[in-house]
Image (cartoon, helix red, strand yellow):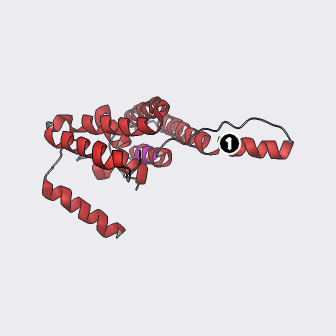
Amino acid sequence: MVFSSIVFLYIFLPILLILYFIVPSKFKNAIMIIGSLVFFAWGEIRYIPIMLLLAVMDFICGKKINKNRDDKNKKRFFLFIDIGVNILILFFFKYADFIIGSINEITGLHIPLMHIPLPIGVSFNTFQSLSYIIDVYRGTVKEEKSFYNYLTYTLLFPQIIAGPIVRYETVEEELDKKNISVDNFSARNEKIYTRTG
């Protein structure tokens, strides 16, 4: 599903917006999580478990880093685990076939290529997760205590697909307290068009 498709513009987006505006505030994040999962599943459903497992890892590592704030070794350990796994996943999806092809060319082997489809938004998702964990490590933000909120932050499909990378501190308050109105919705759109126009 792409942003310019008929399905997205006339079915998916209107239903999502209607549901988001009519449900009580405490369920708005749930609507965005479900909507994002449906959007990603539309592209390739088998990558959903990987996205969810990475979100769980980021969330746990953030909590562990904060808990071991005074223990530099433990703090670094959880930072390196999170960065290492995220980069490894990104590297695998983006460069596995390139590496296999290079090995085949250099050695004359015929290792079959994996032909792995690139998950939607994998780069933005990875770097956004890394920005969160690095900020927690540096102490510029506190770790998110609600996995529900963190999942909303890390899966939000509009910015995972098209960017930019959104720092956690930018949306931290909005994950809990939402000031939603038609005026705010219009104002945000005007800012987007001003930046891109």
Name the quadrant of the C terminus.
Answer: bottom left
* 193 in the magenta segment: no
Q: Answer above or below: position of 71 versus 124.
A: above
Q: Main secondary structure of the magenta part?
A: helix
153 or 37: which is nearer to us? 37
Q: Nearer the viewer, residue 168 or 158?
A: 158
In the rendered image, residue 15, in percent from the top left (x then y), is placed at 24, 41
What is the span of residues highlighted in magenta in the rendered image?
A: 128-132
Outermost residue to the front: 6
Residue 48 appears left or right of 88: left
Quick check: can you spot residue 27?
yes
Instruction: Give the amino acid type for the residue marked by disc 1 in the picture.
Output: Asp
Residue 69 spot, x, y in % from top left: 40, 38
Residue that mark 1 sits on: 97
Q: Is residue 109 left or right of residue 93?
A: right
Residue found 46% across the figure and 49% down from its top: 124
Q: Secondary structure at mark 1?
A: helix
